[in-house]
């Protein structure tokens, strides 16, 4: 039997607090680490390299748990090269790559003992990153928050566990102890969980965003292409219902242009991220909140330590 994620990372539980754009912060990583799991954070959550380095140093000073960093590795992220170098300099424990090829990350980070986990949504891409030397795949299913996949947890895990030689971490559809046990029985070595932690005391997002995670449920999660150009899960608030969840005909037309596609995608991503930032930290009637179906299990705003205890059944 292959090792469990907690054995690989040296944590108490086989759980990663998923990197959440704008939501994840140093306080959350410290609380996660001190609760027996590992936290990961998007490099894009920091405006400057100096802020990035300072946050990691703060986390390291207050917990011994492994630290993960998420790097967007496609052309929408012009800071990727710097992010990779900073992770090497800081000796980050593992990197989670998203939305592109992990080849450069693997080439530059693995020689320094940094593990590389890659987001995948199907077997074909999983086999590709395996061949490049990834240490694990993160199986992003159709129950994940943010950029979700198309396959159910059962279908995706069944395919990857049977055909991949590297570790398979499940992302999406885990919000309770029963759901955690279920995906582990399906062959996952661990899980990546995000949305449960948005409504935590340690999160810096607005009270309104946290309360939305409490008051809305799985049935209220919809896919929108307006945020980044790539389908992304959001809470179906009255404002989202008003603006719709599809790109306009003009945006779709530009996205199909071979010459303009890269730049349109980058501009859409930047514009969408700025919109999410305004929504995350200040409530207005123009509010777009990103979350996944597992907010069904969010019943109150509470400390990360309590969320971990309930998720693991270790009370």
Image (spheres, rainbow, N blue to C red):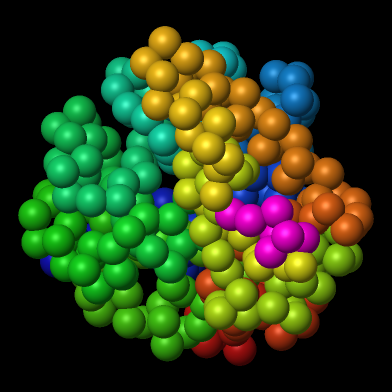
236 or 31: nearer the viewer: 236
Total of numbered circles in the picture? 0
Instruction: Look at the image and tell me in which quarter the N terminus lies.
Output: bottom left
Instruction: Look at the image and tell me in which quarter the C terminus lies.
Output: bottom right
309 or 218: nearer the viewer: 218
Residue placed at 52% from the left, 87% from the top?
313
Q: x, y (%) of residue 294? A: 55, 74
Magenta-highlighted residues: 239-245
Residue placed at 29% from the left, 22% from the top?
103
For residue 59, say whether it is visible: no
Magenta stretch, overall SS: helix
The answer to whether 273 is drawn above or below residue 222 in the figure is: above
The answer to whether 160 is drawn above or below residue 293 in the figure is: above
Query: 154 left or right of 86?
Result: left
Residue placed at 60% from the left, 30% from the top?
268
Give the residue furthest to the top: 259
Quadrant of the rendered structure where residue 235 is? bottom right
Residue placed at 63% from the left, 56% from the top?
244
For residue 149, say whether it is visible: yes
Give the residue furthest to the front: 249
Residue 212 drawn in magenta: no
181 or 89: nearer the viewer: 181
Q: x, y (%) of residue 260? A: 47, 15
Give the residue furthest to the left: 163
Q: x, y (%) of residue 252? A: 48, 34
Quadrant of the rendered structure where residue 129 is? top left
The answer to whether 278 is drawn above or below residue 299 in the figure is: above
Query: 252 left or right of 226?
Result: left
Quadrant of the rendered structure where residue 292 is? bottom right
């Amino acid at each position: 039997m292959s090792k469990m994620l907690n054995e690989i990372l040296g944590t108490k539980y086989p759980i990663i607090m998923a990197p959440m754009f704008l939501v994840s912060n140093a306080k959350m990583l410290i609380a996660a680490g001190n609760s027996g799991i590992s936290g990961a954070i998007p490099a894009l959550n920091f405006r400057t390299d100096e802020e990035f380095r300072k946050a990691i140093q703060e986390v390291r000073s207050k917990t011994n748990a492994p630290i993960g960093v998420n790097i967007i590795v496609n052309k929408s992220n012009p800071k990727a090269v710097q992010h990779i170098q900073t992770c090497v300099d800081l000796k980050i424990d593992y990197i989670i790559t998203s939305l592109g090829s992990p080849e450069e990350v693997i080439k530059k980070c693995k020689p320094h003992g940094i593990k590389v986990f890659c987001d995948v949504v199907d077997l074909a891409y999983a086999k590709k990153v395996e061949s490049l030397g990834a240490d694990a795949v993160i199986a992003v299913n159709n129950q994940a928050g943010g950029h979700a996949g198309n396959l159910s947890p059962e279908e995706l895990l069944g395919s990857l566990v049977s055909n991949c030689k590297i570790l398979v971490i499940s992302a999406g559809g885990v919000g309770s102890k029963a759901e955690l046990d279920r995906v582990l029985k399906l062959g996952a070595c661990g899980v990546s969980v995000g949305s449960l932690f948005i409504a935590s005391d340690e999160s810096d997002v607005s009270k309104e965003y946290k309360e939305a995670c409490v008051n809305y449920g799985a049935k209220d999660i919809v896919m929108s292409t307006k945020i980044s150009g790539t389908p992304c899960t959001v809470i179906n608030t009255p404002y989202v219902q008003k603006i719709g969840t599809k790109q306009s005909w003009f945006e779709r037309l530009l996205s199909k242009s071979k010459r303009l596609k890269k730049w349109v995608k980058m501009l859409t991503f930047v514009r969408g991220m700025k919109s999410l930032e305004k929504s995350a930290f200040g409530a207005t009637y123009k509010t777009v909140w990103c979350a996944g179906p597992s907010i069904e299990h969010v019943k109150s705003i509470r400390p990360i330590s309590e969320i971990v205890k309930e998720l693991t059944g270790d009370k």
